[in-house]
Image (spheres, helix red, strand yellow):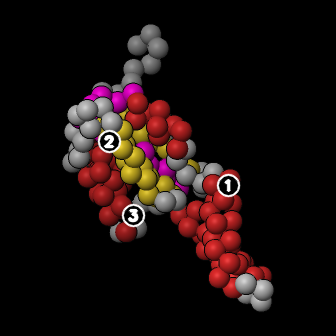
Amino acid sequence: MPSSLIVLAFDTMEEAEQAQEALIKGKREGMLTIEDAAVVVKDAEGKVHVKNQVARGTWMTTGVGGALGLLIGGILFPVGGLVMGLAGGALVGKFMDLGVDGKFVKEVGEQIQPGTSALFVLFKGANPAAEAAILRQFKGHVLQTTLDTDAENAIRQALGDEPVKGWGG
């Protein structure tokens, strides 16, 4: 099942985090599968703050690395093996690039206006009906998505954002 990225902008500093919490609740209820999420807030002074949820893949590879480090290093130096395994696992997770690209998150953070926020969500597969139902309680704008046009427009409509018109239309 391919992943889908949705990047949303909100007019307040709090709303992206509130939308993220609502989506995570939908995940807990089995409506969505979220692989990674990040909230970017630009305060009134223009300083960008990134609140990133650690990707599920990074946690998995860190745990696997820790277990291997403990197993291999357990005989020679148990504590050092565990630490090296955890660090190696996190590095493997980073190289596997499972999640929202940090550079892209920072670029969007620089582009949004002071006093606003953005939400990045990487879904495993897409469930536009569930996503739209959850996001309906928020007012926002779609900045970018990998969804097809119909799914994107459903999300835009739920947020009160105008659907993108085709070229020449």
Q: Is residue 64 left or right of residue 132?
A: right
Instruction: Identify the image quadrant of the N terminus.
Output: bottom right
Secondary structure type for disc 2: strand
Q: Residue at x 46, y 37 (%)?
A: 106
Question: Which numbered disc, 2 or 1, marks the residue that appears first in the sequence?
Answer: 2
Residue 122 inside the magenta-drawn segment: yes
Give the SS element for disc 1: helix
Q: CA distance from mark 3 to mark 2?
A: 23 Å
User: Disc 3 residue type?
Assistant: Lys
**Front-most of residues 151 and 18:** 18
Query: Residue tagged by mark 1?
Result: 96
Q: Amino acid at mark 1?
A: Met
Instruction: Tell me which residue sits at (38%, 51%) in the image.
Output: 51
User: Within 10 Å of the Cα at label 2, are there few (<14), some (14-19), or many (20+) other Cα atoms?
Assistant: many
Q: Residues within 10 Å of mark 1 (few under 14, many from 20)?
A: few
Identify the element where label 3 is drawn.
Answer: helix
On the picture, is 30 further left or further right than 58? Answer: left
Q: Earlier in the sequence, mark 1 or mark 3?
A: 3
Callout 1 touching callout 3 (CB < 8 Å)? no
Which residue type carries mark 2? Answer: Val
- Magenta residue check for 120: yes
What residue is disc 2 on? 41
